[in-house]
Amino acid sequence: MVKFTHLIPVFPFIAFLINIFFGRKIKKVSALVSILFSTVSFLVSIFTFIGFLNGEGSYVVYRFLSFNNTALDFGVTVDALSCMMLLVVTCVGTLIQVYSIGYMEKDPRFSRFFAYLSLFMTSMLSLIIADNLLMFYMGWEGVGLCSYLLISFWFEKMSAARAGMKAFITTRIGDTGFFIGILLLYFITGSVYFKDLSALDTQNNLFYIAALLIFCGAIGKSAQFPLHTWLPDAMEGPTPVSALIHAATMVAAGVYLVARTYSLFMLNEASLAVVGVIGAITALMAASIATVTNDIKRVLAYSTISQLGLMMLGLGVGGYSAGTFHLMTHAFFKALLFLCAGSVIHGVQTQDLLKMGGLFKKMKATSITFVIAALAIAGVPPFSGFWSKDEILAEALNNGHPVLFSAALLTSLLTSFYMFRLIFLALFGRPRSELHAHESPKVMTIPLGILAFFSIFIGLLGSPFTHHAFQNFIAMPGLHHQEEIAVNYLAMGLSILVAFLGIALSYLFYIRNNKILAESVRAKFKPLYNLISNKYYFDEIYDFLFVKPALRLARISSGFDSGVVDRAVNLAASQTIVLSKIQAWFDRYIVDGLVNLVGIVFQVSSGALRRMQTGLIQNYLLVAFFGIILVIIFKLIGGN
Amino acid sequence: MSFPILSLLVFLPLLGSLVILLIPKKKTGAIKALATVITAAVFIISIFLLIKFNYTNTNMQFEERLTWIPQINVSYHLGLDGLSIGLIFLTGLLSFLACISSCRDIHIRHKEYFFLYLMLITGMLGTFVALDLFLFYVFWELVLVPMYFLIGIWGGARKEYAAMKFFLYTLAGSVFMLLGILALYFNSPVRTFDILELAKYAPAFTLGLQILIFLAFYFGFAVKVPIFPFHTWLPDAHVEAPTPISVILAGVLLKMGAYGFLRISFPLLKDAAHYFAFPLAVLGAVNILYGAFVAMAQTDFKKMVAYSSVSHMGFVLLGMASFTVTGFNGAILQMFNHGIITGAMFLLVGVIYSRAHTRDLDKFGGLGVKMPVYAGFLSLFTFASLGLPGLSGFVGEFLSLLGGYYTFKTVTIISALGLVITAGYFLYMLQRMLLGSLNEKWAGLSDISKVEIFTLVPLMIITVVIGVYPLSILKYQSAAVIDLITKISGVIQ
């Protein structure tokens, strides 16, 4: 058996090195370098997939750490889940890079862009094949880095620079939880390997905490409530980046993480419930914001958040294959949506939906693929989104989660509504401003066509027509609850109903009754409208609760450092100086004074005594005479 | 006795500094060349030691022992083991790179500068290989004097203040250390200054005595690390010191304190070490968080990096306080990584300061357009500093936290929150330096030069290699760490 899976992330890394070091020399060739190596990765992924079907599995690559009898080996996981992700990421990634040739054509940092995309592919692919949490975490942070670099790619714009920083720090908050989760898991099990997770079967409550901590990471990366605020801002990056990183692959990594550690979540029903509820809240909240957003990319960003929430909901209700299935179909149609939006932006040079309209006639290829993608996400049969969304709905219903089912259904309604609101506003009706729209070059429209093909047909893999081939393929070994792979006609019927209802409503609002109805609805629900259009005030609340206090704390600490700690040091120094002055004074006037006093006393007394040294014998005799007299008198008085 | 290679390593720079005294003042080229050759030779010897070092052996290697002052039983005793080999390599590398940087950045009084600089290197290398406390103390103090002049003469605006503060602070600490050394000497049944000998007797001291001696050493080491609240000399010294001296200061000098704990305090006074484990861990967490918050508020680039050092050294402290194999490995690795990464950061600060003559972060912006290569290096080392996995900084922090978690859960979790704050202030710095629109004032700045790139590339390679393959450096220390832990705790954790 030839082991080559670990080379998959290596190829894009070579492209990264070439582009980062020689980018300025090879200029436009850097795109070809990135695409070439990415294609090789795609081919190797296919070989890996074939190998997996022939029974080849995971293996160890190299020893990362070792001490004290414990060693940590980095290896690759080859299973259904990783094969699926490898194929999706390399396929979508390569197509997006082809598209980028056209989109980034005039950018002065063209090769830098492709270098970053290649680095992203490296990190994302190593995350996918990781066989342990630490290696996963490395890839995880690596994609975060690339996301930062690419969001702030046009860093001359301050808003882009800030968005990059916000994305990195917000996800880092989740990642810190994830990191502590890894520590905790290592502490209880002594292992960070995924394969050991499936062997756990205790009812230890710490596993519950570990699962939730790991989920924190997924919340950050997959932009789930309450850490979702970074993703809409991330739209400051170039559109292919939004498509690749902030829609199709990286943000889905959170879902992948939950799927990867699914056995940990299954140990405790409560942790799955948390995943489902967070997913439901996110799905509904983001979908509602998408209905009132006017920036074409931000609509899609909120749509991504909402769809990721739906995947989490699917996983949370026990639909392992449903969640991962939606992850796969979503990667294709969401990438397509973004690339179409990019093509529109490329054509009309604005992102404001209210300034577009009637583009269908001018941009045929883009528009047709755009509509296909919209039908897919809206859940219209037989497009791919229908099959995967239906799976989630069916799982929610089958496993007895009526509330989550309703949330998912309502999300579906909102989804088809906002999606067709976008389509109607951008492509149909009359142009609302003077725009000189033109169709994008072939290098951009061909990837659209390929993605459109997948958006239509990929869902069939999980449909009854193929006997749920996808579900049987991905099915988790050892999943105790045997997933129901029967068609749930109730769920299916309702799903189709809401899809058409959404389209019909938005047709009513935005084509038939262009302004009046929308206005009247808006007037009726003014407080709600304000709440939603202000994105539920999350940014403002976070700013007030976290950002400002952190900055204030930083200022206080710094003030404390110079005002108290350092002042104490300087005070000690100045006190020492004062003390030494006192000592100097003491030394000079007391110690030295005493010494001098002795001298002075001798001087004075000797001065006095000197006078006695007259040199006259008579005087001496006189003194001696009186002296003797005195001695005699003393003797006589005190004699006895 | 075999060839005294450690003596050669330690005294080669001193010899060089004496030769420099003989070179006429005007021949700056010759002085620079000689200093560079000497530091290069030191670096090569350190690589040679790394290659020859047998990392499965836990005994002292390349040992040299001569009687020095027999009346009080002082010996000239040098040796190298897994705890010091990494630091010797680090010192060799940074001395060489900082010397190259000195050749560019120092414009006055070359003769005195390189004389003192080489003397400083002898002091640092000697501290890491001395196995006799008397000798250790001599080398420890030898570092102080050249450093005082290097900051005080070639420093910035408040150089006298900073140099004086550094000198007095460290001296005050080492006076306590001297008391500790004497206490060890007079309390051991056999009067000796030999660390390996003392390791046989000192652990039998009563807890009370051990605590007293531990505290005496603590003041000496805590000032150097530096541990809160003895850290305020550091920002001043860094801000005023010339670039190469900042590199040495952060890269090597701070490690002397942490090394002291591992070499002297822990193995000799193991009961006291366990007694103080929790306070040390808390101080580690304080260093991490407090340093990070103070760093966030700085506007001076260099001061920010200085406070980030305080924060990063907190991980070393936490790892050491855990008394686990993992934590010790993390702490030693973090020392090494911090030397590499922060050394590079100070070089990068120097690059921008030598061009713009200011370090005020608020005055920059948009340099990414003007200085793309510089921006690349700065971003790489910034991400290494904030502990991005795949780069070396992460591995040390991860192991320190993992070890810390084993012993002190709450403290470790609180410390881990420092990761977010660290990311915050580093990215804020990147934003203010590189992103946004270019300030027209800096339109004339040239990108990083070839020589500057040359000093950064080795550090970059090490950062990446350790990040993806930490075993490459961990293997040198792991046997020594297991041995040390067995000595301190009796069991391996």
Image (cartoon, coloured by chain):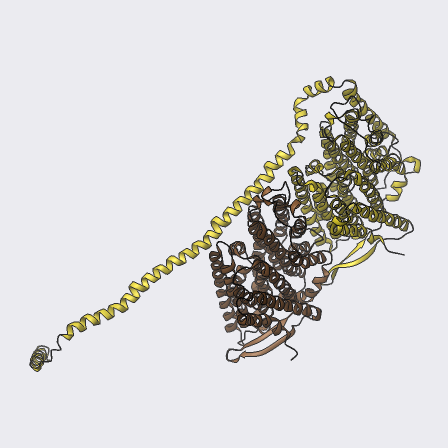
Chain colours: A yellow, B brown
- Taking the image as drawn, is residue B486 in sight? no
User: What is the quadrant of residue A539 in the picture?
Assistant: top right
Quadrant housing the C terminus of chain A = bottom left
Of all residues, the one furthest to the front in this rendering is B26
Observer-nearest of A110 and B247: A110
Observer-nearest of B418 and A635: B418
Q: Position of residue B151 (x, y in %)?
A: 51, 59
User: What is the quadrant of residue A625 in the picture?
Assistant: bottom left
Q: Position of residue B275 (x, y in %)?
A: 56, 61
Q: Position of residue A103 (x, y in %)?
A: 78, 38
Total count of labels: 0
Quadrant housing the N terminus of chain A = bottom right
Q: Position of residue B70 (x, y in %)?
A: 53, 80
- Taking the image as drawn, is residue A407 in sight? yes
Q: In the shown orientation, is residue A87 left or right of residue B380?
A: right
Observer-nearest of B272 and B161: B161
